[in-house]
Image (cartoon, rainbow, N blue to C red):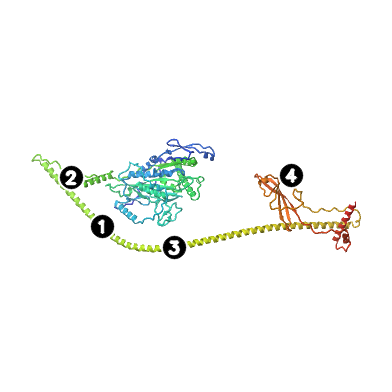
């Protein structure tokens, strides 16, 4: 018989929801994590079996506006911190295991903030298993003897199951064994420390619980798959290393190839099968026959799962992990020997255990880079889950028809069938009673209360309508046991074998006692009994000859197959001998290549040494160039500063000379104007020169309008700032300060104690003389509480040599007056004015 391909049984196309169908609410449980020794401030307390009390912490009262009150939250059951994994499993997960064995689907996921014990609840420890290992233990305890042989059930890669006969399954097992033997052993690498190492080094202790309601007339097979949803991408944690490295967006782990190089896996996509159920296309499904094999796959996936260290958790899950347990079952044939080859009778149930990553706040975890990106994707997916729950609740309470946004996240899109009535949904809320997690725990409690109000349509019971009699497996076992006893001689030949027709010559011999010579009835009964017995014997002989023919035909077929196999074996031996020669040539070639590789390695080593020397020389040259560049830049800055200083000095000198020339020109103009005025008076009063008249008042020379009397003599407190480089001058004019504090370098304290500020600054002028400037200023108190100085005036003290001149006598003046002709009117006027002034002064002296 060949395997048949049909549709997955007992699943009808999706129909619109009907209001008359029975519904069950989502069952939500709460589990408190045991507090650590250093945690004294707790915010959670168990009031009863179904009520949890939350009290706000002091930090929450300070940070939040308004008064925070204690709140009580109701659950299906609240597990205190001392609850064991066994108690939690019996109440939460065991009913789901019973349903999956009976052909129903189940979804169990843990929810909570980071560090609340979700992964511990799902997986547990090697000494105390969590929900996931216990589910596997109970499943295999219940169907251990009822499992079909490996490869009888085979996934069809579109979320269904194919069936194979026992012979085909045996051939596939042999092919798999040959492939495993031909695969060369992998190069041993240094093992990396992982959480799965503890499970491998610890003896496996199974849970003895067993489900009683199991159909013994069915054959079962268990398949497991392990995926994770990282940054909203799905990755297969059980996938074998691909032959090439496909492009994938930020893969969370890398395969280890034979040469040690990591190969990034390819992300998976979601698809919908013929029954509108979502599944991960291309995910690896491994058939397991005992809990140990399933635990090996769990450890294999755990080593590849993304876990990182954060401020709140030493081993924080950075992705949502999903462990799928699929139980395939199909009825046995009428003889109870093999699986009935009808795919329409195959039922596939699924139990999904989801470990959701914890929600995080950036201000607490201080995440950056990849950790921040992971946290944002985790929070976004959890927010989509909450939005879907809210829309489902709104549709059920208000009879609305809003579209549930399952596709916004891979988590909700993968399990949307469960919320639409394809299985039972249960949730375990994990709570950390620490007061620091109060604000995040409040949001988790609100989501839990909202989830409990959602109702899921109850799944239909699965029944196998084959029309076959019950107890086929048991009857076949009894038949085999009786046949074994018969072959060992322990069973009577007249005993009819149970379950199948007995091979006997008829009923036992009747009573043949002759009571009289005329007893013909007894003789007739004996004759009839012998005739029936002979007919039965003839029938048995015919059946035996027929079976002999069948057996002879089978032996001939086996002989033919044996001949074919012998020929194939001879051809394989020839091929192996040819392969041996090829292997010898390959070994020689490998030796030559190894020699060339050694030569190339040494050459490369020489090149590397030369490269290092050249790199060191290049670094030294770069260092010299850098130092020279820095030195030239420093010299350039120094020369620029000197040039700026000289430019400033020349600008000041030019300005001083321009001021001096301007003053000289103003004095000359004043003299000329005065002479012209006196000339006008002389011309107008030429006839009255000898008359007595008061001499004209001399006009005062121009002075600076902004000149004012020095305030050095005031009664204020002065801060006399004299730098150390100043020289003592011998000028007569010196500042006289009554209250002063002389310092070389002032500080803030000195400025606070004074009212006035005086800076003595000395510099050399163009003629080589020392010019002393007294820069004065007022000390004010600034708005910021400090003090500031506002410069108000500058006094200049300067020494210079007088111009060379000699005194002239009066006779020389008169002789000069009367000698020669006057050259011009201006000179005449000037001499006249001087003579007039001298006469007037002489008269005043006489008087």
Secondary element at image label 2: loop
Residue 13 in view: no
The disc at residue 715 is: 4
In this image, 673 relative to 526: left or right?
A: right
In this image, 514 relative to 453: left or right?
A: left
> From mark 1 to mark 4, how far is it between C-alphas?
132 Å
Question: Which mark is nearer the camera, 1 or 4?
Answer: 4
Disc 3 packing (10 Å; few <14; some 14–19; many ≥20): few
> From mark 2 to mark 1, how far is it between C-alphas?
41 Å
Where residue 480 appears, as percent x and y from the top left, is: 25, 46
> From mark 3 to mark 2, how far is it between C-alphas?
92 Å
Which residue is denoted by mark 1 in the rendering?
562
- The answer to which of marks 1 and 4 sits earlier in the sequence is 1
Secondary element at image label 3: helix
Which residue is denoted by mark 3 in the rendering?
602
Disc 2 packing (10 Å; few <14; some 14–19; many ≥20): some
> From mark 4 to mark 3, how far is it between C-alphas?
92 Å
Which residue is denoted by mark 2 in the rendering?
506
Depth order, front residue of 797/498? 797
Depth order, front residue of 317/728? 728
- The answer to which of marks 3 and 2 sits earlier in the sequence is 2
């Amino acid at each position: 018989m060949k395997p048949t391909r049909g549709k997955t049984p007992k699943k009808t196309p999706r129909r619109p929801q009907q209001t008359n169908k029975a519904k069950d609410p989502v069952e939500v449980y709460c589990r408190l994590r045991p507090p650590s020794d250093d945690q004294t401030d707790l915010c959670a307390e168990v009031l009863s079996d179904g009520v949890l009390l939350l009290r706000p912490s002091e930090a929450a009262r300070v940070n939040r506006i308004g008064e925070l009150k204690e709140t009580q939250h109701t659950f299906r059951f609240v597990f205190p911190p001392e609850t064991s994994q066994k108690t939690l499993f019996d109440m939460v997960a065991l009913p789901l295991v019973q349903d999956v064995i009976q052909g129903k689907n189940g979804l169990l996921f843990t929810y909570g903030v980071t560090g609340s014990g979700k992964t511990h609840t799902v997986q547990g420890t090697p000494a105390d298993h969590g929900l996931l290992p216990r589910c596997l233990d109970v499943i295999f305890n219940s169907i251990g003897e009822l499992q079909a042989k490996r490869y009888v059930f085979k996934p069809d890669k579109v979320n269904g199951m194919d069936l194979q006969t026992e012979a085909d399954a045996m051939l596939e097992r042999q092919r798999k064994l040959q492939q495993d033997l031909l695969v060369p052993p992998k190069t041993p690498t240094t093992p990396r420390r992982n959480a799965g190492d503890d499970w491998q080094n610890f003896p496996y202790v199974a849970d003895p619980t067993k489900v009683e309601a199991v159909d013994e007339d069915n054959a079962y097979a268990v398949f497991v798959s392990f995926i994770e949803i990282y940054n909203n991408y799905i990755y297969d944690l059980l996938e074998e290393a691909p032959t090439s490295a496909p492009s994938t967006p930020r893969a969370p782990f890398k395969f280890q190839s034979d040469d040690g190089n990591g190969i990034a896996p390819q992300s998976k996509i979601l698809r919908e099968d013929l029954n509108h159920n979502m599944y991960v296309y291309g995910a690896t499904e491994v058939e397991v026959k005992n809990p140990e094999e399933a635990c090996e796959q769990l450890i294999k996936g755990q080593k590849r799962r993304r876990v990182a260290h954060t401020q709140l958790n030493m081993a924080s899950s950075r992705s949502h992990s999903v462990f799928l347990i699929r139980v395939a079952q199909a009825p046995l044939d009428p003889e109870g020997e093999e699986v009935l080859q009808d795919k329409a009778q195959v039922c596939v149930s699924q139990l999904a255990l989801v470990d959701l990553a914890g929600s995080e706040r950036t201000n607490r975890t201080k995440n950056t880079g990849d950790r921040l990106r992971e946290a944002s994707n985790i929070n976004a997916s959890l927010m989509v889950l909450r939005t879907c729950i809210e829309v489902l609740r709104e549709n059920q309470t208000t009879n609305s028809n809003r579209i549930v946004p399952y596709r916004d996240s891979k988590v909700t899109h993968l399990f949307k069938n469960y919320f639409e009535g394809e299985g039972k949904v249960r949730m375990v809320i994990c709570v950390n009673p620490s007061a620091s997690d109060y604000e995040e725990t409040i949001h988790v409690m609100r989501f839990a209360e909202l989830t409990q109000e959602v109702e899921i349509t109850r799944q239909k019971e699965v029944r196998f309508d084959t029309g076959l009699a019950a107890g086929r497996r048991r009857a076949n076992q009894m038949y085999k046991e009786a046949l074994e006893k018969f072959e060992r001689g322990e069973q009577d030949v007249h005993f009819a074998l149970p379950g199948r027709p007995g091979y006997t010559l008829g009923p036992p011999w009747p009573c043949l006692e002759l009571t009289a010579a005329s007893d013909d009835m007894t003789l007739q009964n004996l004759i009839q009994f012998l005739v029936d017995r002979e007919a039965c014997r003839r029938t048995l002989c015919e059946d035996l000859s027929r079976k002999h023919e069948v057996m002879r035909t089978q032996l001939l077929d086996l002989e033919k197959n044996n001949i074919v196999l012998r020929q194939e074996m001879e051809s394989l031996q020839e091929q192996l001998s040819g392969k041996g020669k090829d292997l010898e040539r390959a070994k020689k070639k490998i030796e030559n290549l190894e020699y060339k590789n050694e030569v190339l390695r040494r050459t490369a080593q020489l090149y590397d040494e030369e490269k290092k020397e050249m790199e060191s020389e290049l670094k030294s040259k770069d260092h010299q160039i850098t130092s020279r560049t820095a030195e030239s830049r420093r010299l350039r800055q120094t020369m620029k500063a000197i040039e700026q200083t000289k430019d400033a000095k020349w600008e000041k000198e030019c300005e001083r000379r321009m001021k001096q020339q301007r003053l000289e020109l103003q004095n000359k103009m004043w003299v000329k104007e005065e002479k012209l005025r006196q000339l006008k008076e002389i011309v107008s009063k030429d006839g009255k020169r000898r008359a007595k008249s008061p001499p004209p008042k001399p006009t005062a020379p121009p002075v600076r309008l902004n000149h004012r009397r020095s305030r050095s003599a005031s009664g204020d407190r002065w801060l006399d700032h004299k730098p150390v480089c100043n020289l003592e001058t011998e000028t007569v004019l010196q500042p006289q300060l009554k209250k002063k504090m002389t310092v070389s370098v002032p500080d803030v304290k000195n400025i606070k104690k004074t009212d006035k500020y005086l800076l003595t600054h000395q510099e050399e002028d163009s003629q080589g003389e020392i010019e002393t400037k007294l820069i004065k200023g007022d000390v004010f108190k600034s708005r910021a509480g400090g003090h500031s100085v506002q410069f108000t005036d500058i006094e200049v003290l300067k020494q210079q040599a007088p111009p060379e001149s000699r005194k002239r006598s009066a006779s020389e003046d008169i002789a000069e007056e009367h000698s020669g002709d006057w050259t011009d009117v201006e000179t005449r006027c000037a001499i006249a004015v001087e003579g007039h002034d001298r006469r007037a002064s002489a008269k005043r002296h006489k008087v």
